[in-house]
Amino acid sequence: MAKQEAAVPEREIFSLSGPLYLTAVDWKNPHHRRAVAASLVRGVYILERDHQENRLGHQAQASPWWNFFHFQLSHMLIDDVDYSVFGAIYEYHSFAFDCNAPKFVIAFRGTIKKPHTKSRDLKLDLQCISNRLHQSSRFQLSMQAIQNVISLVGAANIWLAGHSLGSAIPLLAGKNMTKMGYPMETYLFNPPFPSAPIERINNEKVKHGIRVASSVVKAGFAVAKQGQNQRSQKDDSFYALSEWVPGLFVNPADHICSEYIGYFEHRKKMEKIGGSKIERLATQYSIGSMISGVFGGDSEALHLLPSANLTINLSHCPDFKRAHGIHQWWDPNFLGQSELHLFR
């Protein structure tokens, strides 16, 4: 008896769950840019799902996720431990030239909880939480790929994009490239923010009090550290990142990324009550990075940012799975608010 083909989930099929309304992309439209970037990230997920399910030829589902927007798959990024597809380099090809479109997009998937990828991805999740993702071979492979593409066309024509664990990689890579003088356009969907879930506290006074107390402690640590190293603020690498303004896309119902909302809102509140100097020092540290610094580790919190364009999805999400999912970012009925946060 012939083996019956497994049914492909609807959410993996572009014609059933992709942004079909984007038949003509306006590359100046931030909503269109967000939807395209998210779709290209989804394409990486489906590349690996095709690999896992051995879907070849007409059975493969990945290519419509980039072909629809006139991109071609230039290169796949393969993990050196589990040999899974974790990233992709797309090159834009269109008969109608548009200077606002990227020449290349380098996209990264997040965790896939399937037997072939679960162990490796969860280990990387733990490295992300413990501030050690930059030590992983997956990140090193990503950095090499990004630098290779930059050497071809320059950073101005390249986008970085990722979702969940896959957004932590371009976040770190974007920081590194900015320090080298190459700030890049970056789209971070549901990026992880390792922290106590302060944002889930309903009492605003309690929440604000906790954040203020935390800021005072972290500012004190920053002053002690700067005095010990005899460094000025101008020399600090955190301040050097302020010109880079990545796009952060978060959902309040997603506890993995929702702390970014409180992180930037608290900076505004501290400025209003006259605590901007304290917050300028505190904002570059997390409690975890402080503890790491005390014991001789890296005190730079890899997930913290001086500047960002923060977009919050205000649409109702019935469960965590949808709040953390990638599909929300191309929903034609997307309801959100964006705010630019600049570090001065």
Image (cartoon, helix red, strand yellow):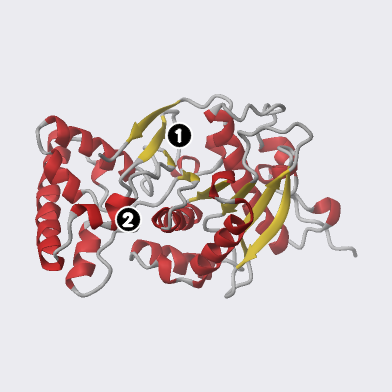
Question: Residue, x 15% and y 57% (percent of image)?
Answer: 222
Label 2 Cα neighbours within 10 Å, binned few <14 / some 14-19 / many ≥20: many
Q: Comparing marks 1 and 2, which lies closer to the viewer?
A: 2
- Left or right side of 37 for 191: left
Above or below — where is 131 with respect to 96? below
| Whole-number angstrom distance, CA of label 1 to CA of label 2 | 22 Å
Above or below — where is 231 with respect to 333? below
Question: Can you give x and y, in whole percent of width and height, for residue 220 in the image?
Answer: 9, 56
Q: Quadrant of residue 31?
A: top right
Question: Residue, x 56% and y 26% (percent of image)?
Answer: 29
Label 1 Cα neighbours within 10 Å, binned few <14 / some 14-19 / many ≥20: some
Pointer 1 residue: 317
- Helix, strand, or loop for circle 2? loop
Q: Quadrant of residue 34?
A: top right
Quarter that holds the N terminus: bottom right
Question: Can you give x and y, in whole percent of width and height, for residue 177 in the image?
Answer: 45, 56
Q: Earlier in the sequence, mark 1 or mark 2?
A: 2
- Helix, strand, or loop for circle 1? loop
- Left or right side of 224 for 269: right
- Left or right side of 289 for 94: right
Question: Can you give x and y, in whole percent of width and height, for residue 277 in the image?
Answer: 13, 42
Question: Can you give x and y, in whole percent of width and height, for residue 261 in the image?
Answer: 31, 39
Of residues 186 and 129, the one drawn nearer to the viewer in this rendering: 186
* Residue found farthest to the right: 1
Residue type, numbered disc 1:
Cys
Quarter that holds the C terminus: top left
- Check contact, mark 1 vs mark 2: CB within 8 A: no
Question: Residue, x 49% and y 47% (percent of image)?
Answer: 184
Of residues 1 and 195, the one drawn nearer to the viewer in this rendering: 195
Pointer 2 residue: 194
Residue type, numbered disc 2:
Pro
